[in-house]
Image: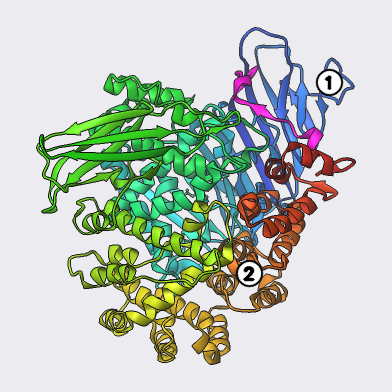
C-alpha cells in the first residue's frame, strides 16, 4: 500500500550499530522444508545502547540464543527478543557476543525466486539485492562484510552436488544416511554474495593457471542433458581470466571457481563469490541450438560476472545507492573485453544503440534518475539502463580523459586502497583524481544528476587564415529534483577529415562550459568535423551536416563507429521526413538518395562484414520512436515497411548476389563465420520484402539445410512473417517445435518468433500459446519470450488500435505481481513512455495502468513504478482503501 511504501534516502546513510564479523550456517535441505541455523559473531560499533536489529522476511523462527543461552519472545526487549514481519530485535549486554537462530523456510513455494528456491528439482539461491533476509536473520546490507562457513546436508540421491562459496573443507555421511559438505570462504563478503546450490548436476571441468602460478579448478555445472553445451562458456571464462590479468593486473584469488546454470532465474546471472549462478540462457551454447548473438551473450555475461570478483566482490558497495560503482564499472570492463575479443567498432555500435533505445528514453521519462540515485522505494527497480549502461559510459569518459595508462593507474590505487571494503562512487572518482592530479568535481555531476545533455555543434571556415572554428554548446535538461541543468564535463573525441579522407587534426576536446569555441589552423577547405568519435560521451549531438558531408564520413572516417553514425544520421533524417509526411496524410517517398547510399555500401569491398551488415540495417523502431515528439507507432511501422519494400525491390539483384555469395550450407559451423551469416541474413531480410515469391523457397531451403541455429532461426522468422511464405508457415513452425520441444531455450525462441510477428491477427496466435503445453509452468525466460517480446518487440500487436495488446499484457502483469514482483515490475516497462504516444493510444495505455494501480493488493515493486508513471496523486487516489502485499 502506498502509505507503507517507505522511501530510503542516500542522505540518511549511517553505519550499522553492530557488525557481524563471522557466520556459521547450517542448511538441512529436505523435501517440503529447509531448516537454516545460523551462528553470528557480533561486535558492537561505537558506544551506544541500541538493540541489534536483524532483517528477516518469510522466515518461521524456531529458536533464538544469545551467547548460547536460549532467549524467549518478549513484549519488550528487556524480556527477550521481539520479532515481526521484517525484523528480529534483541538487546545484547556485551560488546562482542554471539547470536544463534534457527528458522524454517519453504524453497519449493518460493515463486519470487529471491532467497533460496528450487529450479528444475535443484536448490539454488539469489541474494542480491535483499534476498539473504529470506534465508536467515541477518544485517542484510552491503557494508556488513563477514566471513562465512557453510554446512549443507541433503539426501545423497536428490542432491549429490552440494556447493557454496569458498573452499570445500569437509564432506561425508550424516548419521541418518544423508550426506554433507562444508565450505569456508576466507574473503569477507556482504550477504548479497552468499550462494548455495544443491542438486543433481553434471559438470565440465578444466583448469586455469594464473600469472603467479596458482592452479585454479574451473567447473561449470548444468543438467546432464546439457553437458555438451558448456564448452563455449568454459572458453569464455578462461579468456576473461586472462584478460583481467593482462588489462587490469587482477588475478583470481581462490583455488576453485564454479558456475551453475539454472532454468529459473529473474536476471541474467549473478556474481556470488566463487559460485556464480547463471540463467541457462547465458551459459548453454551449441551450434544446433544457439545463434551467433547467443554465443556473444554467453561470452559477455560470463566475463561480466567473472570481472565482478574484483569490481564488486573484493571491493564492494557501501550501500545500494552505489550500485553503479560495481555495475557501471563491470559493464565497462565487459564491453572492452568483448571489443577485444571481436571488433571494437561493432561492439561499440551495438552498445550505443542499446543505450539510445533503453537509457536515453528512461532518462527522459517518469523513471529518470541519476546513475547514482539518491532515493528509492525498492532497490530491485534500480537495476536500470541508467545505472548499468550510463554507469558504463561514465567510466568510459574517465578512461578517455585519463587515457589508458591513467585509468589503469587509478584502478590500481582503488584496489590497493579499498580491498576488502565497502565504498562509494566518490571513493572511485578520488582514485581517478589521485592518479591524474586532475580536479573531477564537475565530472561528479554525471553521477548525481539525471538527463541526457544536448550538444549543438556549429563550425565555420575562414579561407583567409585557412582555419576552422568549431563552437560547441551544451544544454542540460532540468528535471524535478534530478537535474538542475549545470554544465557537464564532456570529453569530445574528434578529428577533422580532409577532402582526401585523411585526418588533419585529431584529439580530445573538453567541453566544460555552456558554450566553448575551438579554432584549428592549417586546415584544408571542405574538411569535415567528426565529433564524439567512438561515442565518447552519452549525449545527443545536433550538427548541421549536409548529406555530402555525411557521405564523406561514411567512407573516410577513421573511426568505425562514426562511419556507421554518419549513415545512421542520414537514414534517420530520411525516415523522420517520411513519417512527418505520412502523418500529414501524404505518400511515403523513398528517395534516390537513400537508394544511392545503399548502393555505395553494397559496392564496398574493404568493409568488415558485420560493419557492412550494420550499415545496411534501417534504424529500429525503438531508435526512431524516442525522436518523435508524439509517437504514432503505426506511422513508424508504415514508413519502415515502405523503406524495406523499396530497398528490397530496387536492389533485388544486389541483395540476391550478396545472399548467394555468402550462403554456404556445406561449410560446417564456425563462429568466425558470424559476419558472413549476418550479411547473408540481412540480404534475405530485404529480399523477403521485395515482392519476389521465390524468396519464400530460398528461406525454406535455408531452413532445411541449416547446420546452425543462426541460419535456421533467421529462416523461421522470415517464413512466419513473409506474406508469400504463408503456405509453408504452419509446417515449418511445427517442425521447429517438435525438433526442439525438449530444449527450453529453443522453445523460448520459437515463442519469441510468434510474439514478435507483426502479421495480421497475431494476438490470437499469441494468446493461444499461453494455453499451449509450453506455458504450463513458465520460467521467467518463457514469460519474457512471450510477453516481453510482444510488448517490446511487436509494435503493431502491442499498440493495436483497439487497446487489446495493452490489455493482454496488463492482465499478465497483474497476475504475475503476486508471484514474482521483480519480473512483473520489469515487464511494465513497455508502458513507461505512454505519455509520449498518440493521444488515443495514450488514453488506452493509461486505462491499463490505472487498472493495475487499482488492484486490491500490489507489490512495492510495481507500486513504485505506477506511482512514478501516473504521478503521486493520481496513484494515491487509486489506492484509497487498498492494501499492500
Ligand atoms: N549483480 C547482477 C545480477 C543481479 C541484478 C542480481 C539484479 C540481483 C538483482 C549481475 O552482475 C548482472 O549485472 N547481471 C546482468 C547481466 C550483465 C551482463 C549486465 C543481468 O543479470 O542482466
Ligand atoms: Zn553485474
Please say whether residue 310 is one of the residues in the magenta stretch: no
Q: Nearer the viewer, residue 448 or 19?
A: 448
Which secondary structure, mark 2?
helix
Name which quarter of the figure residue 299 lies in.
bottom left
Name which quarter of the figure residue 617 lies in.
bottom left
Q: Which of 539 and 332 is in front in this view?
A: 539
Q: How far apart are marks 1 and 2 (CA)?
A: 59 Å
Q: Name the residue at 42% across, 91% down.
A: 697
Q: Choose mark 1 or mark 2, whichever is in front.
A: 2
In the displayed structure, would residue 423 be above or below residue 370? above
Q: Name the residue at 67% across, 34% down.
A: 38
Quadrant location of the C terminus in the rendered image: top right
Label 2 packing within 10 angstroms: few (<14), some (14-19), many (20+): many
Q: Given contact means CB atoms under 8 Å apart, are the residues at marks 1 and 2 in contact? A: no
Quadrant location of the N terminus in the rendered image: top right
Q: Give the range drawn in magenta.
A: 1-20
Residue 167 location in percent, x, y? 47, 41
For residue 697, which numbered disc appears in the image?
none
Label located before the other in sequence (1 or 2): 1
For residue 80, which numbered disc appears in the image?
1
Q: Name the residue at 14% across, 48% down.
A: 498
What residue is disc 2 on? Answer: 797
Please say whether residue 16 is one of the residues in the magenta stretch: yes
Label 1 packing within 10 angstroms: few (<14), some (14-19), many (20+): some
Amino acid at each position: 500500500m502506498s502509505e507503507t511504501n517507505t522511501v530510503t534516502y542516500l542522505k540518511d546513510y549511517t553505519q550499522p550499530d553492530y557488525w557481524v564479523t563471522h557466520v556459521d550456517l547450517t542448511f538441512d535441505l529436505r523435501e517440503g522444508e529447509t531448516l537454516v541455523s545460523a551462528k553470528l559473531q557480533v561486535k558492537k560499533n561505537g558506544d551506544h545502547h541500541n538493540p541489534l536489529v536483524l532483517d528477516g522476511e518469510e522466515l518461521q523462527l524456531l529458536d533464538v540464543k544469545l551467547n548460547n543461552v536460549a532467549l524467549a519472545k518478549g513484549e519488550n526487549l528487556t524480556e527477550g527478543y521481539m520479532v515481526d514481519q521484517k525484523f528480529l530485535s534483541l538487546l545484547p549486554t556485551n560488546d562482542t557476543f554471539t547470536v544463534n537462530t534457527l528458522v524454517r523456510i519453504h524453497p519449493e513455494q518460493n515463486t519470487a525466486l529471491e532467497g533460496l528456491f528450487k529450479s528444475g528439482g535443484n536448490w539454488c539461491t539469489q541474494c542480491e539485492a535483499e534476498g539473504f533476509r529470506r534465508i536467515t536473520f541477518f544485517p542484510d546490507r552491503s557494508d556488513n562484510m563477514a566471513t562465512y562457513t557453510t554446512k549443507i546436508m541433503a539426501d545423497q540421491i536428490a542432491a549429490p552436488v552440494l556447493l557454496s562459496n569458498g573452499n570445500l573443507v569437509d564432506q561425508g555421511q550424516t548419521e541418518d544416511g544423508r550426506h554433507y559438505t562444508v565450505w569456508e570462504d576466507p574473503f569477507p563478503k556482504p550477504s548479497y554474495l552468499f550462494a548455495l546450490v544443491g542438486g543433481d548436476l553434471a559438470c565440465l571441468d578444466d583448469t586455469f593457471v594464473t600469472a603467479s602460478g596458482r592452479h585454479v579448478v574451473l567447473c561449470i555445472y548444468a543438467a546432464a542433458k546439457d553437458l555438451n553445451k558448456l564448452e563455449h562458456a568454459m572458453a569464455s571464462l578462461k579468456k576473461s581470466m586472462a584478460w583481467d590479468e593482462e588489462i587490469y593486473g587482477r588475478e583470481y584469488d581462490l583455488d576453485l571457481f564454479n558456475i551453475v546454470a539454472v532454468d529459473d532465474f529473474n536476471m541474467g546471472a549473478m556474481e556470488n563469490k566463487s559460485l556464480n549462478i547463471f540463467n541457462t540462457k547465458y551459459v548453454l551454447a551449441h551450434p544446433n541450438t544457439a545463434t551467433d548473438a547467443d554465443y556473444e551473450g554467453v561470452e559477455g555475461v560470463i566475463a561480466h560476472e567473472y570481472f565482478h570478483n574484483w569490481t564488486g566482490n573484493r571491493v564492494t558497495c557501501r550501500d545500494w545507492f552505489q550500485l553503479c560503482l560495481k555495475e557501471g564499472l563491470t559493464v565497462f570492463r565487459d564491453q572492452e573485453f568483448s571489443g577485444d575479443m571481436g571488433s571494437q567498432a561493432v561492439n561499440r555500435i551495438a552498445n550505443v544503440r542499446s543505450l539510445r533505445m533503453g537509457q536515453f528514453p528512461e532518462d527522459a521519462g517518469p523513471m529518470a534518475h541519476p546513475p547514482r540515485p539518491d532515493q528509492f522505494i525498492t532497490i530491485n527497480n534500480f537495476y536500470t539502463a541508467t545505472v548499468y549502461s550510463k554507469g558504463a559510459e561514465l567510466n568510459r569518459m574517465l578512461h578517455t580523459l585519463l587515457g589508458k595508462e591513467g585509468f589503469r593507474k587509478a584502478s590500481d590505487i582503488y584496489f590497493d586502497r579499498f580491498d576488502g571494503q565497502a565504498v562509494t562512487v566518490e571513493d572511485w572518482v578520488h582514485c581517478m583524481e589521485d592518479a591524474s592530479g586532475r580536479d573531477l568535481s564537475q565530472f561528479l555531476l554525471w553521477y548525481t544528476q539525471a538527463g541526457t545533455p544536448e550538444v549543438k555543434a556549429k563550425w565555420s571556415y575562414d579561407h583567409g587564415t585557412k582555419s576552422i572554428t568549431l563552437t560547441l554548446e551544451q544544454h542540460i535538461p532540468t528535471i524535478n529534483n534530478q537535474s538542475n541543468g549545470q554544465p557537464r564535463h564532456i570529453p569530445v573525441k574528434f578529428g577533422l577529415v580532409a577532402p582526401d579522407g585523411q585526418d588533419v587534426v585529431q584529439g580530445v576536446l573538453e567541453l566544460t562550459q555552456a558554450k566553448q569555441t575551438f579554432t584549428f589552423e592549417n586546415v584544408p577547405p571542405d574538411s569535415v568535423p567528426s565529433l564524439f568519435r567512438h561515442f565518447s560521451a552519452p549525449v545527443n549531438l545536433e550538427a548541421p551536416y549536409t548529406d555530402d558531408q555525411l557521405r564523406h564520413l561514411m567512407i573516410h572516417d577513421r573511426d568505425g563507429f562514426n562511419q556507421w553514425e554518419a549513415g545512421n544520421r542520414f537514414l534517420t533524417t530520411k525516415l523522420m521526413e517520411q513519417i512527418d509526411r505520412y502523418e500529414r496524410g501524404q505518400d511515403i517517398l523513398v528517395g534516390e538518395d537513400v537508394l544511392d547510399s545503399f548502393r555505395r555500401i553494397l559496392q564496398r569491398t574493404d568493409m568488415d562484414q558485420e560493419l557492412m551488415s550494420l550499415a545496411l540495417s534501417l534504424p529500429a523502431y525503438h531508435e526512431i520512436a524516442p525522436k518523435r515528439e508524439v509517437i504514432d507507432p503505426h506511422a513508424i511501422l508504415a514508413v519502415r515497411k515502405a523503406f524495406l519494400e523499396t530497398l528490397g525491390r530496387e536492389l533485388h539483384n544486389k541483395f540476391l548476389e550478396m545472399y548467394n555469395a555468402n550462403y554456404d550450407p556445406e561449410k560446417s559451423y564456425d563462429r568466425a563465420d558470424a559476419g558472413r551469416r549476418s550479411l547473408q541474413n540481412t540480404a534475405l531480410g530485404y529480399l523477403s520484402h521485395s515482392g519476389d515469391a521465390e524468396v519464400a523457397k530460398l528461406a525454406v531451403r535455408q531452413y532445411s539445410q541449416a547446420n546452425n541455429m543462426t541460419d535456421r532461426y533467421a529462416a523461421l522468422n522470415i517464413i512466419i512473417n513473409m506474406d508469400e511464405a504463408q503456405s509453408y508457415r504452419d509446417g515449418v513452425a511445427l517442425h521447429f517445435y517438435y525438433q526442439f520441444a525438449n530444449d527450453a531455450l529453443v522453445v523460448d525462441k520459437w515463442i519469441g518468433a510468434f510474439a514478435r510477428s507483426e502479421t495480421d491477427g497475431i494476438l490470437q496466435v499469441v494468446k493461444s500459446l499461453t494455453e499451449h503445453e509450453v506455458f504450463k509452468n513458465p520460467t521467467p525466460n518463457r514469460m519474457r519470450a512471450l510477453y516481453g517480446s510482444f510488448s517490446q518487440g511487436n509494435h503493431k500487436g502491442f499498440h493495436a488500435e483497439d487497446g487489446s495488446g495493452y490489455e493482454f499484457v496488463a492482465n499478465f502483469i497483474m497476475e504475475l505481481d503476486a508471484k514474482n514482483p521483480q519480473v512483473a515490475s520489469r515487464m511494465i516497462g513497455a508502458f513507461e513512455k505512454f505519455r509520449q504516444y498518440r493521444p488515443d493510444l495514450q488514453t488506452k495505455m493509461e486505462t491499463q495502468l490505472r487498472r493495475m494501480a487499482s488492484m486490491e493488493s500490489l507489490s512495492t515493486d510495481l507500486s513504485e513504478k505506477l506511482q512514478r508513471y501516473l504521478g503521486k496523486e493520481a496513484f494515491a487516489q487509486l489506492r484509497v482503501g487498498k492494501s499492500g502485499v
